[in-house]
Image: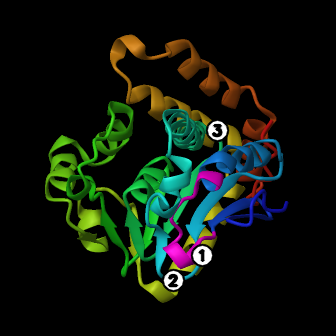
Amino acid sequence: MTAITDQLIVETDGGVGRITFNNPERRNAFTFEMWRDLPQALANFADDPLVRVIVLSGTGDKAFCAGADISQFKDKRSSEDAVAEYNEAVQTASDTLAATELPTIAKIRGYCVGGGVGIALCCDLRIASDDSRFAVPAAKLGLGYRLDGLQRLVDVVGPAMSKEIFFTARQFDATEAASMGLVNRVLPVDELDTYVNDYATRISENAPLTIHAAKVVVGEALKSHESRDLDLAGRVVDDCFESNDYAEGRQAFMEKRKPNFQGS
């Protein structure tokens, strides 16, 4: 699989799909073209039966993503129509990443700022190097965040930490990010790549329907009681028990061998 734009490097490695943000001169800040093309990259992985998990990362060792590339704002946000188009691209990319059926991992090294935090929050798991730095500097710029953008942060770190992140606009180191639940794991820099590769491979070897069911049910659990789709939550669990993979898992356990799951 090749990149849609040279600023998104899209690759597959066995059961792992990789999307690398490639704008290192600006600490992998997201351009309009990156926002626009990210949904297509995700759709390509969703259509590939061999891909079981997606890892998102930034080129180089300076940043995961430093937010939006403001050098484009003069051209890309120069009129009311242009602003609407830009905002729609950001919203669509974020929603598509959050809604993708495949499990997603943000591999974070260096700066993860503003929109970079937003992208990471759209992923299921976040694994960071110990030199990572996190911030949402909206209060230093006079920006406001809409409910849908803040909701993901509140869901992950809670209301009090969300307020601290926004009220102070300061940088948090990786240890603080882990303590507030913003990241799942913190690794020494020289261990990050190996750990995430092994982590993603482990996920890719597990039963896809089980992982999908867990992702769906957790998503429904985060909704208000009246908004939950109980039929969907029940159906994805039933799909697991009715699958060939369930039979394969039981057989492999009895035979004391590694299961070969097919996602069906």
Q: In the shown orientation, is residue 143 left or right of residue 82?
A: left
Tell me if residue 32 comes above or below residue 208 in the rendering. Answer: below
Residue under label 3, please give it: 101
Tell me if residue 2 comes above or below residue 189 in the rendering. Answer: above
* Amino acid beneath label 1: Thr
| Front in this rendered view, residue 52 or 164 | 164
Span colored in magenta = 22-33
Tell me if residue 147 comes above or below residue 38 in the rendering. Answer: above
Q: Where does residue 13 sit, x and y in percent of width and height?
A: 78, 67
| Front in this rendered view, residue 159 or 113 | 113
Sequence-earlier tag: 1 or 3 = 1
Residue under label 2, please give it: 61
**In what element is the residue under mark 3?**
loop
Location of the C terminus by quadrant is top right
Residue 59 image label: 1
Location of the N terminus by quadrant is bottom right
Tell me if residue 25 comes above or below residue 216 in the rendering. Answer: below
Tell us which disc is closer to us: 2 or 3.
2
Alpha carbons under labels 2 and 3: distance apart: 29 Å
Q: Where does residue 156 sit, x and y in percent of width and height?
A: 33, 46
